[in-house]
Amino acid sequence: MLKSIYLTMSPLILGGITNIIFTKTKLYRAHKSPIDGGKCLKDGRRIFGDNKTIIGFISMVCFCTVYQLLCGLLCNLLDLNSFNDLYSIHPNTIGLNLLFGLLVGVTYMLFELPNSFLKRRLGIGSGKQGNGMIGTLFFIIDQIDSLIGVFFVLFLFSDIGVIGYLIYLFVGAFTHIAINVVLRMLKLRKSL
């Protein structure tokens, strides 16, 4: 089961890592424009903050789509379709991979926005989690917010079921933390 989970999640994992690396480039910094346009609500606080950018949104969608297409190609070439939960009920086609990759990228980014919105309302800065019990709660939310949406897309496209969805969420959260630890050690990320 773990092999299927990681094979199915690999485009998302690689897309996320590539996107974080991309945010360190001159190209990203030159075109970094916040989704909220720098606007504040009546409370005087930003809507989402500086870390949610248009180019970051677009690049995540593009990276997830490219990696999904590559995953489909490799699964076909290496006869791994039976180990990928997406291909268990759908033929592995370019069209399916293109659609699924786009949906995963868009959903990943969209499901991060409510968390950022709520943090700004509570006065927690971009890239921060807060202190005490609030900090712990946001640490957990930061690990799963996007995954809730992404794995719901997988749930709709596959036959993983509710239990499978919850297992994906647990494995995804653990994997997200592990990758963030590595990225922090490599100085590609400031926080977990």
Image (cartoon, helix red, strand yellow):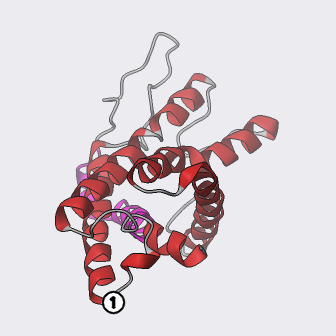
Q: At 43% across and 44% down in the image, what residue appears?
A: 51
Query: Which image quarter is the C terminus in?
Result: bottom right
Q: At 33% across and 46% down in the image, what residue appears?
A: 106
What is the count of numbered marks? 1
Can residue 59 be seen in the rendering of this structure? no
Q: At 33% across and 64% down in the image, what residue appears?
A: 22
Query: Circle 1: is it few (<14), some (14-19), or many (20+) Cα within 10 Å?
Result: few
Query: Circle 1 is placed at which residue position?
Result: 78
Residue type highlighted by circle 1: Leu
Query: Which image quarter is the N terminus in?
Result: bottom right
Residue 63 vs residue 102, the one in the foreground: 102
Q: Position of residue 38 (x, y in %)?
A: 35, 29
Residue at the outermost bottom position: 78
Helix, strand or loop status at disc 1 = loop
Task: Say left or right for 105 vs 152.
Answer: left
Q: Position of residue 33 (x, y in %)?
A: 28, 41
Q: At 60% across and 66% down in the image, what residue appears?
A: 175
Question: Magenta stretch?
Answer: 10-32
Can residue 90 be seen in the rendering of this structure? yes
Q: Is residue 2 above or below residue 131?
A: below
Which picture quadrant has residue 18? bottom left
Residue at the outermost left position: 95
Residue 138 vs residue 190, the one in the foreground: 138
Q: Is residue 94 magenta?
A: no
Q: Is residue 15 magenta?
A: yes
Q: Is residue 125 above or below residue 22?
A: above
Q: Is residue 20 above or below residue 130?
A: below
The majority secondary structure of the magenta stretch comes to helix
Task: Say left or right for 15 vs 70.
Answer: right
